[in-house]
């Protein structure tokens, strides 16, 4: 007897993972591989696309093998990816012409600043819902075409493909047959009109990106891709795809307008469902496509924190204060509660609501008795404070911020989740299944393959694990948030 299962390919910023889920959303097999971050210059971040492909392939085969040993047969697959990270590769061979430029990379800050100075920001925002910031993909693609010998001419001749990581992986998985993306990833490029739902000729000219290199945009549940058995060990239908944060919205069952989630990984990303009409922020939040599936386009407001788990990684790899990321919870608990140490993790600038690409990190409030524990506490708190900033912006744009669904690796830290509830003054709800990004991708694959009949089935499968209610004295909350905002002001100055 075999049971039907779904495969999720979850290609993230620091690792590639493959997870097999049964039809109830329970993970039955997992494989994961970390890979190196490449820092050619301060503020620049790259990945080796061949390593991304190799780790995706290895983890997928391993997860399929583990699931088969337990009696599961994969019916179909879905893909979630780190958004905004771009690759340019040869259409004929699939060979990348440059390292992937990662979403955190700041090398196009000067170009974005020039476009802003030229008055282009309102035009970009009205069509894409995005701000002019090096975070987004369009300027990254243009940079590669301008800095690799002969690339621009080859791109205009149709010899190159460009896209986000999903497009690159789909091209490889289908052995070069398809160059496609989904609507959520397209909406993060600053080249895609989110209401017309097409590549925008005016924006392509603005960013100097030839349309010939770009993928066809498909629905999140209608990718229409297939990997032959020679790639993954079995023939596999790949119907679902979404950027990781939008996939997490599906996994968190934020299917109704007003429902909100925040995912804590390398960065932290908060999205609130705004329904079938895009809502344009007055407070420097982003308007984005949440998903396009079953004939409907749903939009979201998003706030982006560029460094969350990355801050913990910096303590581990950069400073050597901890040997494993899991050690930070107990170390932070040992901090002097009277210490007013703040860490603003602007390693690659600040995201929403500040959008300051040139900002750099800052630690304030150090005294002679400040030590490892105080730095650990400040590192964790930085994610909480940035979330509070986003919730304030969301509230100013009219969102109900009284309840926040959370997921991602950092949410296993109960102390951190209580701190989040206290300082945000919101109920924080953690689901039983915290692998929401991968589960959302798998569900979209199942939806496209007919395993599920509607998105509503995702809501029926969602279960809460624990709720954290705010318990901090309002005066203390205000004092701590005031200290944080003073530290941010110093960073921006």
Image (cartoon, rainbow, N blue to C red):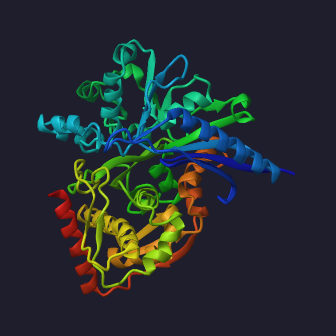
**Image location of residue 61, percent across then percent down:** 70, 41
Residue 351 at what x, y percent from top left? 29, 53
Residue closest to the eye, 399 or 493: 493
| Image spot of residue 430 (x, y percent) | 51, 70
The quarter of the displayed image where residue 118 is located: top left
Q: Nearer the viewer, residue 375 or 87?
A: 375
From the viewer's perspective, tell me whether residue 339 is left or right of residue 435: left
**Residue 91 location in percent, x, y?**
50, 19
Residue under the point 52% across and 70% down? 327
Q: Does residue 335 appear left or right of residue 172 in this picture?
A: left
Residue at 75% x, 35% y is 234
> Is 425 placed above or below 282 here?
below
Q: Using the rendered image of the protein, determine whether residue 222 is visible from the camera's viewpoint.
A: no
The residue at the point 37 percent across, 52 percent down is 300
Q: Is residue 461 left or right of residue 153?
A: right
Q: Residue at x 23, y 53 (%)?
A: 359
Tally of numbered discs: 0
| Quarter occupied by residue 307 | bottom left
Q: Quadrant of the C terminus?
A: bottom left
Say which of 143 and 249 sits in front.
Answer: 143
State left or right for residue 78 relative to residue 188: right
Above-or-below relation of 180 to 8: above
Q: Furthest-front residue in view?
A: 368
Is residue 223 in sight in this rendering? yes
């Amino acid at each position: 007897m075999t049971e039907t299962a779904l495969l999720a390919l979850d290609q993230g910023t620091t690792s590639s993972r493959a997870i097999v889920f049964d039809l109830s959303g329970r993970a039955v097999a997992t494989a994961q591989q970390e890979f190196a971050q490449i820092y050619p210059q301060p503020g620049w971040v790259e990945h080796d696309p061949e390593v991304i492909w190799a780790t995706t392939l290895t983890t997928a085969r391993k997860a399929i093998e583990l699931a088969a040993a337990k009696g599961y047969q994969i019916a179909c697959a879905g893909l979630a990816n780190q958004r905004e990270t771009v690759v340019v590769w040869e259409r004929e061979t699939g060979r990348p012409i440059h390292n992937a430029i990662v979403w955190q990379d700041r090398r196009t800050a000067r170009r974005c600043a020039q476009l802003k100075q030229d008055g282009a920001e309102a035009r970009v925002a009205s069509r894409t819902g995005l701000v002019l910031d090096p975070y987004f993909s369009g300027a990254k693609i243009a940079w590669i075409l301008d800095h690799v010998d002969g690339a621009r001419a080859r791109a205009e001749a149709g010899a190159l493909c460009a896209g986000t990581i999903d497009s690159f992986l789909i091209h490889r998985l289908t052995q070069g047959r398809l160059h496609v993306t989904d609507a959520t990833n397209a909406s993060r490029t600053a080249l895609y009109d989110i209401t017309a739902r097409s590549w925008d000729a005016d924006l392509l000219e603005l960013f100097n990106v030839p349309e010939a290199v770009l993928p066809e945009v498909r629905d999140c549940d209608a990718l229409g891709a297939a990997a032959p058995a020679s790639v993954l060990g079995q023939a596999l239908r790949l119907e679902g795809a979404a950027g990781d944060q939008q996939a997490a919205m599906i996994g968190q069952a934020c299917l109704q307008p007003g429902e909100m989630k925040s995912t804590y990984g390398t960065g932290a990303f908060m999205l609130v469902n705004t329904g079938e009409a895009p809502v344009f922020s007055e407070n420097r939040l982003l308007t984005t496509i949440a998903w396009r599936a079953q004939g409907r386009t749903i939009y979201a407001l998003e706030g982006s924190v560029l460094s969350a788990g990355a801050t913990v990684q910096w303590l581990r790899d950069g400073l050597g204060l901890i040997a494993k990321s899991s050690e930070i919870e107990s170390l932070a608990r040992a901090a002097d509660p009277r210490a007013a140490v703040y860490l603003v993790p602007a390693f690659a600038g600040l995201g929403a609501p500040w959008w300051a690409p040139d900002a750099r990190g800052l630690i304030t409030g150090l005294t002679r008795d400040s030590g490892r524990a105080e730095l650990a506490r400040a590192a964790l708190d930085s994610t909480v404070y940035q979330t509070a900033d986003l919730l304030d912006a969301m509230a100013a744009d009219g969102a109900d911020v009284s309840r926040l669904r959370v997921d991602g690796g950092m949410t296993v830290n109960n102390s951190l989740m209580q701190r989040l509830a206290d300082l945000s003054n919101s109920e924080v709800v953690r689901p039983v299944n915290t692998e929401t990004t991968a589960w959302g991708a798998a569900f979209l694959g199942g939806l496209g393959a007919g395993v599920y009949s509607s998105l509503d089935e995702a809501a029926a499968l969602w279960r809460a694990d624990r709720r954290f209610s705010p318990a901090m004295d309002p005066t203390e909350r205000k004092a701590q948030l005031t200290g944080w905002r003073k530290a941010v002001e110093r960073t921006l100055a």
